[in-house]
Image: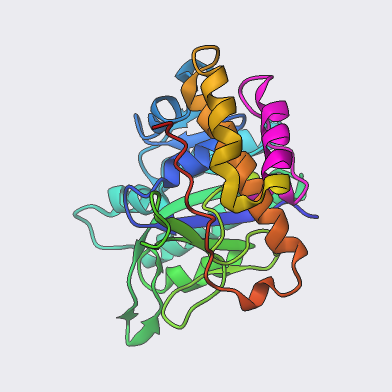
């Protein structure tokens, strides 16, 4: 399968950065100063182990990509929060639409260049609701000026929206990977099931793309726990994880334990929905977002 150009958007504080860092921690990460702190606080990855290039505006992002894409040394490229990068560039000034369109096209070309070298290209953004722009209806989507939410989304392979779903306690968020009447979404590579786990890394793994872990014990643990969850049934995942989690607490970073355990659960869900020919009829997404692994 070709490597995807992927955009993930959603409201603030739903875990966009954590999900993206879990997928891209081993590659090039372009972000504003301090924006990737969740990689350490939530995932336990030290900043010195990350390849981060700091950029305030979209122009800065493009200058970095002009150099880094030529190097062909990064296994994945992640551009954090495109919405804010554009906002900073346009703060207090009238939008130069020709320049803006040109820069978005350039970003799309870098994403395509990465794809041509089998490098996944990941972009995150905030969201905005449906509206009109210059008299034209624009569906809700990534927070971009003008009609770019529709136009730029068409230049990537996967557009995911992070959505709140209160039935998914205690972490009530899932991915929309299928377009709605009022919202942009889509997955022409069929990697992410609609209303499936909000887990970019595991979706890529299940499609055959290598996404490493920061610690050598984590892949084996995730594999073993996934097999055990599949055998016990997804509804019984806590019964599988709790004793293993308790046994290993203190031996490994608790954030890494939770990371591997969540991936194990999501792996089973991804594969089950992918292998079920009737899964497209089920839009409930039940059990997939109940991912709290805190041992009470």
Residue 207 among magenta residues: yes
Task: Give the side of residue 235 with respect to residue 207, left or right.
Answer: left
78, above or below 10, in the image = above
Residue 209 among magenta residues: yes
**Residue lying at 39% horizontally and 55% vertically, measured from the top left:** 172
Task: Give the side of residue 103 with respect to residue 271, left or right.
Answer: left
In the foreground, 27 or 46: 46
Residue 27 locus on image (x, y percent): 61, 32
Quarter of the picture containing the N terminus is bottom right
Residue 163 locus on image (x, y percent): 41, 62
Picture mark count = 0
Residue 262 locus on image (x, y percent): 55, 40
Judging from the image, the colouring scheme is: rainbow
Q: Is residue 289 visible?
A: yes
Highlighted range, magenta: 203-229
Q: Is residue 103 visible?
A: no
Which residue is outermost to the right? 1
Q: Quadrant of residue 259?
A: top right
In the foreground, 110 or 132: 132
**Residue lying at 37% horizontally and 50% vertically, measured from the top left:** 14
**Residue lying at 47% horizontally and 18% vertically, measured from the top left:** 46
In the foreground, 210 or 108: 210
Quarter of the picture containing the C terminus is top left
In the foreground, 9 or 203: 203
Which residue is outermost to the bottom? 135
Q: Quadrant of residue 71?
A: top right
**Residue lying at 43% horizontally and 47% vertically, measured from the top left:** 16
167, above or below 223, in the image = below
Residue 126 locus on image (x, y percent): 37, 56
Which residue is outermost to the left? 92
107, above or below 256, in the image = below
């Amino acid at each position: 399968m070709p490597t995807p150009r992927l955009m993930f958007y959603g409201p603030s504080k739903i875990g966009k950065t954590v999900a993206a860092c879990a997928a891209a921690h081993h590659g090039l990460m372009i972000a504003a100063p301090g924006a990737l702190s969740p990689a350490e606080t939530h995932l336990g990855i030290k900043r010195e182990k990350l390849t981060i290039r700091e950029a305030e505006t979209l122009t800065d992002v493009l200058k970095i990509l002009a150099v880094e894409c030529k190097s062909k040394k990064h296994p994945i490229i992640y551009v954090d929060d495109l919405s804010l990068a554009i906002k900073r560039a346009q703060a207090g000034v009238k939008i130069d639409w020709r320049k803006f369109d040109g820069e978005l096209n350039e970003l799309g070309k870098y994403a395509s260049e990465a794809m041509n070298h089998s490098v996944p290209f990941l972009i995150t953004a905030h969201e905005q609701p449906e509206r009109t722009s210059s008299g034209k209806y624009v569906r809700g989507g990534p927070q971009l000026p003008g009609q770019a939410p529709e136009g730029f989304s068409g230049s990537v392979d996967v557009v995911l929206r992070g959505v709140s779903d209160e039935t998914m306690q205690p972490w009530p968020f899932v991915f929309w990977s299928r377009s709605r009447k009022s919202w942009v979404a889509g997955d022409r590579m069929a990697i992410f099931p609609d209303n499936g786990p909000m887990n970019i890394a595991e979706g890529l793994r299940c499609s055959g793309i290598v996404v490493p872990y920061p610690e050598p014990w984590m892949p084996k643990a995730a594999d073993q726990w996934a097999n055990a969850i599949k055998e016990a049934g997804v509804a019984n995942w806590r019964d599988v994880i709790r004793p293993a989690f308790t046994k290993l607490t203190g031996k490994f970073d608790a954030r890494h334990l939770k990371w591997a355990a969540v991936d194990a659960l999501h792996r089973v869900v991804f594969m089950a929905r992918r292998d079920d020919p009737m899964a497209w009829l089920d839009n409930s997404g039940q059990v997939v977002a109940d991912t709290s692994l805190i041992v009470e």
